[in-house]
């Protein structure tokens, strides 16, 4: 079995995002976040202390990175 973790991106970094990121990182690796609000992303990074790539456009994220899965945590 491979030790390679699934690479996740998260769309939406508001109230629920930081909590869900913890669960993602238990079984996978959160590599990028996307939110139209730079302020929300800054709060996410500050509260989680994760080093992730940040995007404001979801299509740009998908075009720029190879991810295995996406978590939708926004409205």
Image (spheres, grey):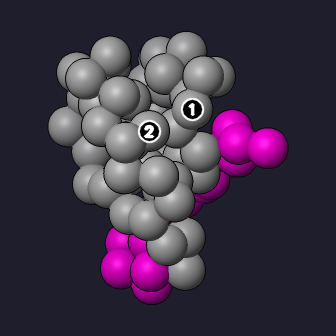
Residue with the mark numbered 2: 40
Residue found 59% across the figure and 51% down from its top:
11
Find residue 56 and report its horizontal and vertical position in percent: 44, 65
Residue found 63% across the figure and 22% down from its top:
16
Q: Residues within 10 Å of mark 1 (few under 14, many from 20)?
A: some
Residue 75 vs 26, above or below: the answer is below
> Residue 53 or 14: which is nearer the viewer?
14
Tell me where the magenta segment starts and ends, as one range. 60-75
Q: Which of the labelled discs sits on residue 23, or is there none? A: none
Residue 29 vs 55, above or below: the answer is above
Q: Residues within 10 Å of mark 2 (few under 14, many from 20)?
A: some
Residue 25 placement, left or right of 17: left
**Quadrant in the picture for residue 59:** bottom right
| Label 2: which secondary element | helix
Find residue 63 and report its horizontal and vertical position in percent: 45, 84
Residue found 38% across the figure and 63% down from its top:
55
Residue at mark 2 to residue at mark 1: CA–CA distance: 6 Å
Q: Is residue 4 visible?
A: no
> Residue 40 or 58: which is nearer the viewer?
40
Q: Is residue 28 visible?
A: yes
Find residue 26 and report its horizontal and vertical position in percent: 47, 17
Q: Are marks 2 and 1 in contact (CB under 8 Å)?
A: yes
Residue 55 placement, left or right of 13: left
Residue found 32% across the figure and 19% down from its top:
48
Q: Which of the labelled discs sits on residue 14, or is there none? A: 1
Find residue 44 and report its horizontal and vertical position in percent: 38, 29
> Residue 48 or 70: which is nearer the viewer?
48
Residue 67 shown in magenta: yes
For the C terminus, which image quadrant?
Answer: top right
Residue 4 shown in magenta: no
Of label 2 and label 1, which has the lower sequence position? Answer: 1
């Amino acid at each position: 079995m491979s030790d390679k973790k699934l690479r996740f991106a998260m769309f939406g970094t508001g109230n629920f995002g930081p909590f869900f990121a913890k669960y993602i990182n238990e079984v996978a690796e959160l590599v990028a976040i996307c939110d139209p609000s730079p302020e929300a992303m800054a709060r996410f990074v500050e509260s989680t202390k994760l080093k992730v790539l940040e995007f404001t456009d979801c299509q740009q994220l998908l075009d720029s990175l190879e991810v295995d899965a996406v978590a939708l945590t926004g409205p």
